[in-house]
Image: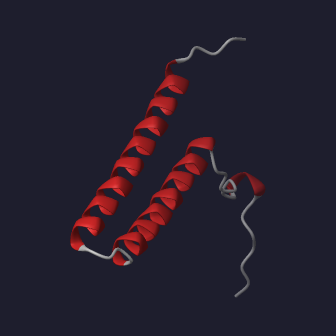
Amino acid sequence: MSETAPPASQQPEPQTFTRLDVGILIVLVSMAIAGVLGLIAVLAADTDLSALSIGLGVLWVVVLAALRFSALAASRVERPVDG
C-alpha cells in the first residue's frame, strides 16, 4: 500500500511566530530566571529577616517589570497605525 503526498493546496501552512508570541516567550523566560535568582538569593541569606526582605525585593522588581511590559504593550495596541 503506497501513500501519496496530498496536493499542495491541502498541505498545512508552516508554523510562524508572531511578535506577540516572541514577546510572551521573552517574558516567561525572564520570569523563570528572576524566580531562580530570587530563590538563590533567599537561600544564601544569613537570617530569616534578611531572606524575607530579599524575597520581597525580588518580588517588587518582578511585579514592576511586569507592569511596565503590560503598559508598553497597551500603548502599542492603542496607537493608531499611520499609512
- Locate residue 11, reporting x and y percent: 69, 58
Is 52 displayed left or right of 32 in the figure? Answer: left
Is 78 displayed left or right of 10 in the figure? Answer: left
- The quadrant of the picture occupied by the C terminus is top right
- The quadrant of the picture occupied by the N terminus is bottom right
- Locate residue 78, reporting x and y percent: 50, 19
Question: Which color mode does the image show?
Answer: secondary structure
- Locate residue 75, reporting x and y percent: 50, 23
Residue drawn where x is 56% and y is 49% of the image: 21
- Locate residue 49, reporting x and y percent: 22, 66
- In the depicted view, which residue is nearer to us: 34 or 22? 34
- In the depicted view, which residue is nearer to us: 46 or 69? 46
Examine the image and state in which quarter residue 25 appears. bottom right
Q: Residue furthest left?
A: 48
Residue drawn where x is 34% and y is 61% of the image: 54
- In the depicted view, which residue is nearer to us: 35 or 17? 35
Image label count: 0
Q: Residue furthest front?
A: 46
In the displayed structure, 14 sits above or below 77; it is below
In the displayed structure, 35 sits above or below 79; it is below
Residue drawn where x is 68% and y is 11% of the image: 82
Residue drawn where x is 35% and y is 74% of the image: 45
Is 83 displayed left or right of 49 in the figure? Answer: right
- In the depicted view, which residue is nearer to us: 37 or 18? 37
